[in-house]
Amino acid sequence: AHLDRAIEVTRSFAFELSPPILHDLGLAAALEALGEQMEKEHGLRFIFALGQGWSTPAEGAGLVLYRVLRELFHNVAKHARASRVRLELAGSREGLRIVLEDDGVGFDVAGRGRAGRSLGLFLAREQMARLGGRLEIDSAPGRGTRVVVSLALEEKAGSAGPGERRSP
């Protein structure tokens, strides 16, 4: 029974870190599904906006972006006491921009970093820096949080475009 439970937990964890929808339908669809899951599990009103110019990042970058946004969503659910979260994906020739905003309690960004209590945010910033991207947080107690994740795009063939739906 313990072995069966360990296998189940391992499969669930692997699925969360790299869901099939990410590989099958792209980052936009995977992030939308993640937001809908957070809405169901945590009662947050989820708003999704896919802007013009969105382009599918390379698979490795897409996986990192997914994991970074997963961490940010979990932070909202765990700490923000928010009722609403909005995710906006946009792009241009220069790159991608993902904005996650909540209407929660906010926090002191500088104080949180010094206190060492934000390992998840630290790791998310590090992952973005390794990709050549950025993660910027704008928050203050009492006014919610806005996180902007940006990444310059490499030229690549076969971008699926705004809806990221790829034909088989």
Image (cartoon, rainbow, N blue to C red):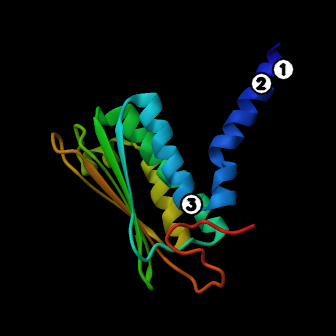
Residue 6 pos. (x, y %): 77, 24
Residue 2 falls left or right of residue 14: right
Residue 62 falls left or right of residue 94: right
Farthest residue toward the front?
167
How many angstroms separate mark 2 from mark 3 (CA)?
A: 29 Å
**Screen quadrant of the N terminus:** top right
Circle 1: residue type: Leu
Circle 3: residue type: Leu
Q: Is residue 117 visible?
A: no
Instruction: List the residue tagged with mark 3.
Output: 27
How many angstroms separate mark 3 from mark 1 (CA)?
A: 33 Å
Q: Are marks 1 and 2 in contact (CB under 8 Å)?
A: yes
Q: Are marks 3 and 1 in contact (CB under 8 Å)?
A: no
Instruction: List the residue tagged with mark 1.
Output: 3
Closer to the chain start, of discs 2 and 3, is 2
Closer to the chain start, of discs 3 and 1, is 1
* Residue 3 image-quadrant placement: top right
| Total numbered labels | 3
Residue 53 pos. (x, y %): 43, 77
